[in-house]
Amino acid sequence: MLFSIILLFVAFASFNGAKNTEKRLADIAVVKQEFLDKDQAMVATLQKIEAGEKLAIPYWKLPSEPMTIGNRYPRLAIMQPEALSFIATGQSDMYTHFKSPRIYGNTFALDYAEMINPVQLLFGNFDLAFVIIYILPLLIIAFTYNILSKEKELGTLRLLSSQPISVFRWLLQKVGIRFVIFNTLTSLILWIAIAIGSIKDAPNATSLFGLFLLITGYQLFWFVLSFMIGIKINNSSKNALTLIGCWLLLVLVIPATINQIGNTLYPTPSRLNMINEIRLIKKENEKKQDEIMDSYLRDHPELAQGAGQEQFGFWHNYFASEKVLEEKTKPLLARYNSQLKKQQTLQRTFQFLSPALLMQQSLNKVAASSEMHYNDFKTQVNEFSLKWRNYLVPMLFNQEKFTLKNYRELPEFNYRNRVAHPIWQDVLVLLLINGIVLLVFGDRSLWKQNSETFLE
């Protein structure tokens, strides 16, 4: 029965996780094909231009112009899912996995959020992380809440009074056997789910071993907690109510409270304020266009190449003012990133108060779907956008044409998972929490108590 219940939950969660990952891959495949089609058309046009053919295309649409390439044929930045992305949805339902930064626009203020169903956002996703964090503890509670009280209520505990054995040791053996059975079943089912659900090459063996140790440590916590409460209270109904209360506190209340405290202590600046500030700076830049251009050329003399002011048009003025805009908005962006890092630091600092919070953050990192991953993706896109601009802007100021040779030299985006995940540290923290529970609830005298003590 237990095997069937766990198998049902894990199978359904794995199906949902795999479905989300497949949708993500399908969306990426669509935009990738659109990108390739546009590039093929651009290359064909460039070949005609270099062959001397005359084309009925407006000047501003010709791919031989660097700014046309930068604005109409942007490169594609993709964040591919990892092998274990199906385990935890994390932030993947809120942020986009691909971006095409154009040369026109504020690359430092790109929007990476996606429109999502608010009902789905409210209730979350039924993935493996949800089963591991929320469902498994409930199954453990149902499996262990009356391990001592049931013996008392059935009268079999009295039989132990004639035996020179510590009830604590006897119960510990019973709980140990149940833990081994439960953990073996869970590990076997999860291993099958991971083997089937992994979207590409097998996950790293070390990381996979660490993941199973992490899940084992989390299950052990609930077994230890149920064991100690069962001994201290020794009443089936009260045991169940107390353990459900602990589940609500540790899985729901504490994580939500820590998150709310972080948002209250370190609120992120309003995006609306940033947009209004950008608009005001743009208006100010329009009034000082000549001064900005002179200052820009002094800072970048290699771009002037002896050209006179009369040769500078819209794009030259745009990049000069864009640089000023970026510099003036840096403090706001720095403040936003600083507040966000403080929130994350607060969560990491107090994650030991709730094993569920620790597990959620760790599983999100395993699945490469944490907020840290998407913030790093945004950083990598911005870094690439700067590299992309730096390739095309000198061509504009030097009045060079874009050719097939330039196309082959264009920088390409390659996403790298740069977020460190000390999973072994999380495993040690879980073991430490288990030790703390034993110290708080445990008593050396329990080892020597006989059945008469628990019959009172």
Image (tube, rainbow, N blue to C red):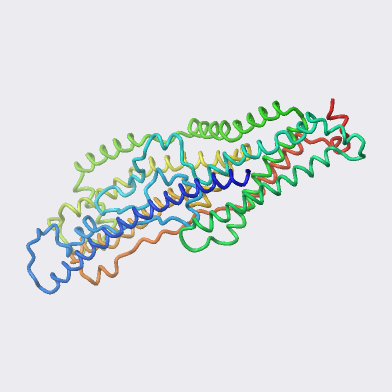
Judge from the rendering whether residue 393 lies leftward or rightward of residue 55; answer left or right: right
Asked if residue 264 shows in the view, the reply is yes
Quadrant into which the C terminus falls: top right
Q: Which residue is drawn at 44% across and 59% down?
A: 416
Asked if residue 426 shows in the view, the reply is no
Q: Residue at x 53, y 42 (%)?
A: 130
Q: Which of 177 and 95 is in front in this view?
A: 177
Residue 317 drawn at (x, y percent):
20, 51
Residue 319 drawn at (x, y percent):
24, 52
Quadrant into which the N terminus falls: top right
Q: Which residue is drawn at 70% across and 26% down?
A: 238
Q: Which of 119 and 287 is in front in this view?
A: 119
Residue 292 drawn at (x, y percent):
23, 48
- How many labels sit on residues? 0
Residue 234 drawn at (x, y percent):
77, 29
Residue 371's place in the image compared with 51, above or below, is above
Q: Nearer the viewer, residue 143 or 389?
A: 143
Judge from the rendering whether residue 100 lies leftward or rightward of residue 354; answer left or right: left
Q: Nearer the viewer, residue 403 or 210?
A: 210
